[in-house]
Image (cartoon, rainbow, N blue to C red):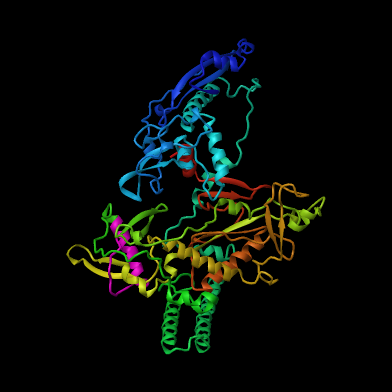
Amino acid sequence: MLAFPATFTRSQVLGGLSFKHLKNQYSIKLSTIAHNRVGGATSSTWRFGILVRHDEGWISPPLPRSNLPDSRIINMIDDKIGGGFRSPPSRAWLTLRNSDDLGWDLGARPDKTEYWVRCPSVFSPKAPIIRPMALHELSALWDFLLPGNDELPAVLRSKLLISFLHGPPGKMLRNFSRGTLRYLWSFFEDHVKGDKSDTRFIDYKLIEVEDMGIKAIHLKATKADDAPVDFEMWAWPNESELETLSRNLLRLACFSFWKLNLLREALRWLKTSPDSLPSERLINQLAIIDCITRSSNSTFWDWDDGSRLFFWRWEQWWKSARDGEILFHECDPPRWMGRNLPAPSPHYETLLRKKEGKLVHRRYLEFGFVDSIVPRFGVPKGDDDIRLVWDATRCGANETLWAPSFWMPVFRTIQDLIIKRLPCSVTDYFLGNIPVSPSNSDWRIPHQSDMDVGEMFLNYLLHHSERHFFGARIVTGEGDGEVCQIMRFSRLLFGGRPCPYLAVQGHARAIELITGNIADASNPLGWTQVITNWPFDFGYDPSMPRVIRVRRDGEMAPGYPAFVDDGRISGVSKEICDSATHRFCTKVNYLGEQNASRKRRPASTTPGAWTGKMLWTHESHPIKGILPEKWSKQRDAR
């Protein structure tokens, strides 16, 4: 299969192929395809061709054609980009187009990446702006997905885009190759399949990665908030009823001791607290009473009365944990007392009210003076649950708030924490001390486990001075018996502009406290040295991470990247992974955050998806995969 720009004539195509030397064995069939006829957004046109052998049994497949509705530049525009001009500058006149037009033939000048467009922007609601197209927008015009700034620097992203532009657009490639390959496969099934004498075809076994998406459907990270706890994870295989009863009694005794110890520790801290003013001591006392009350009403598996950070354990951040987070205001939010957004169905409304009732029951909402109401709506979460979102944009609050940008771990972070199977420690591997005939017990098999922070945003208090800006309209009852109450948030709300930053910042502080002293020999998260594995180093191994933290015993230290509330813990063996998971889960509860036991996943070589992707270590080298729905979305360039 071949592709050439439409400016190439048939003779140029045949001349470029030196076809006169091939015409005795092959025939060529050419067809012209327009990008906008296959759902594209540019005016590009390419010539596609198929070289077909004259062997007996081969027939020339029909060239695929399609008349899909075309797109426009507006479909690829990122309206969250601001700046630009009101009138076009002189350098923009040659390429300036409206966002409702077809895009440029980017392949005609593949080394050029500056194209100007007149388009809408959320920062200019009254009039469109004139600006150059961003790199990811040009890549979308050409039907390719460009890695983000966090994955590649701008220079490499520009070079990657130019390499895309030297070939045909993605939708044209997919349209042509999909139809042709489908025809060839049907021809293979009808004429050749089962004919063992035909050596042109070999029965290859598909690589196991093709199966990863199917196997991992039941391993999706998203679970319902009321999903039951898998008690078998904390039990022996084939455990008897007597053993189960004994284990439950032991849990109950340990949990009672934990509550008593928490009270004694809080009282000791209160006697030696650094605040000497009576008003500050009263604040400390009230905060401790709330912490002890919530922990007393909790169970071994869940925080039934809600949680509150045990602020005296947060070291230098104890005041922020006690008083709550102060938001970043550019000006005071406007006064808005509107109603909630209508739910799409009565069942949806019932689910939303159930979520609201949980907030009231756990005292995350309180009564008090309110300046503004934040409406709510729901979005699907998993297969049978919804996520309650508070629309602080609709009431105008987000327009007056500011939030800094911040880094988040990506899938590459996990890749750098997983290594191939080794018959020795990492230190011995790089020193060359590899056993010649290792036994099965010598092999280090990397494992990964998942832990989840429950009610991530609601773990962190909203400062008293901020609460009157974020009211909530809570409706209870049905029909004529409906009652509407106005309450306000005492915790970070899911939908406030700076709330993701503040919640992630709070959990990052928790991770630093959980990690503890890295020089402590008993700390499963500690390390004593760092091995670097740079290109052109003596002994450089491209199959290993560039930077490796090493423990005292020479093994690679566990890692814990957290994407908001979803944590992935890795270790070079099941024992190391289990010990690191145990420390993280227990220390999260120790600090007053919620460890969601119902979302816990044990150490495995085939864990579920994390940020929509999978990394399995059941073979000698790690294998990457992606969930079927994400693969379909990227394949179809949606």
Q: Measuring from the top left, give residue 302's x and y in whole percent.
A: 46, 70
Question: Between residues 111 and 88, which one lies in front from this camera angle?
Answer: 88
Asked whether residue 555 is in view, the answer is: yes
Question: Between residues 398 and 133, which one lies in front from this camera angle?
Answer: 133
In magenta segment, residue 489: no
Outermost residue, left direction? 480
Q: Measuring from the top left, give residue 363's x and y in whole percent.
A: 36, 73
- Quadrant in which the N terminus is drawn: top right
Question: Between residues 571 and 70, which one lies in front from this camera angle?
Answer: 70
Horizontally, residue 476 falls left or right of residue 272, namely left
Where are the magenta residues, as a range? 348-375
Q: Measuring from the top left, give residue 387's x and y in whole percent.
A: 38, 58
The structure residue drawn at horizontal position 53% and vertical position 37%, both measured from the top left corner, is 161
- Quadrant in which the C terminus is drawn: top left
Horizontally, residue 272 falls left or right of residue 24, namely left
Residue 207 against residue 150 in the figure, above or below = above
Residue 384 against residue 306 in the figure, above or below = above
Asked whether residue 314 is in view, the answer is: no
The structure residue drawn at horizontal position 38% and vertical position 44%, both measured from the top left corner, is 85
Number of numbered callouts drawn: 0
The quarter of the picture where residue 355 lies is: bottom left
Residue 104 against residue 457 in the figure, above or below = above
Residue 414 against residue 106 in the figure, above or below = below
Q: Measuring from the top left, give residue 279's x and y in whole percent.
A: 41, 87
